Image (cartoon, grey):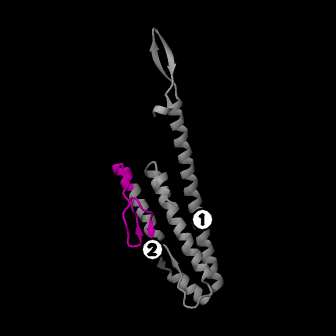
Amino acid sequence: MNLLSLISDNISDLLVRIIEFTHTRQRVLTENIRNIHTTGFMPKDLAVGEFSQSLNEAIVEHVQSHRLVLRDTDNIKFGESTCLQATPIVDEYAGELLEHNKDEYLELQINKLVENLLNRKIAAELLRQKQQTFAFFHRRAVDKPTTRQSGSKFAPMYWDKKQH
């Protein structure tokens, strides 16, 4: 799914990147659960800290200079016209749990999935609300009557939607 086509501003761009990241992370974490009984399997995760740091730096840049700059990291690549690319990294702590206590390993993976799902839902809801607000104000701007002078009285004038 190309969510970048939905972007209308910098905040929307950040929300779309969060949705893309959480979608990719869900696949990685699900794969970790699917391979719980695979001998020699090493669990992976995405570089959540790197991603978070990139977003924080982009927000600071945006506040200071009114432009959004997302900088690539070792494991996170932002593209202008392509989807976010996040390279899974080995999760050594999860690997230790998998080796010694499968129940705790499974609980860890489920907790990560729940946290990831909540992040995705929040970002998706914020994006949805932002788009509804944009559409509402856009409709009001198009439908809003203005006034023009007709003789000595003011008469309402409406925008022709076909012209805009």
Q: Which residue is mark 2?
A: 87
Residue type beneath disc 2: Thr
Question: Which image quadrant is residue 102 in?
Answer: bottom right
Q: Position of residue 144 (x, y in %)?
A: 52, 28
- Check the image and report above or below for 31 versus 84: below
Viewed as shown, does residue 66 lie left or right of 3? left
Viewed as shown, does residue 120 lie left or right of 55? right
Q: Nearer the viewer, residue 11 or 101?
A: 11
Q: Earlier in the sequence, mark 1 or mark 2?
A: 2
Magenta span includes 28? no
Viewed as shown, does residue 130 lie left or right of 62? right
| Magenta extent | 60-86
Residue positioned 58% across, 53% down in the render? 125
Residue positioned 49% across, 52% down in the render? 6
Q: Position of residue 64 (x, y in %)?
A: 35, 51
Q: Secondary structure at mark 1?
A: helix
Q: Position of residue 115 (x, y in %)?
A: 59, 67
User: Do the CB atoms of the residues marked 1 and 2 lie less than 8 Å apart?
Assistant: no
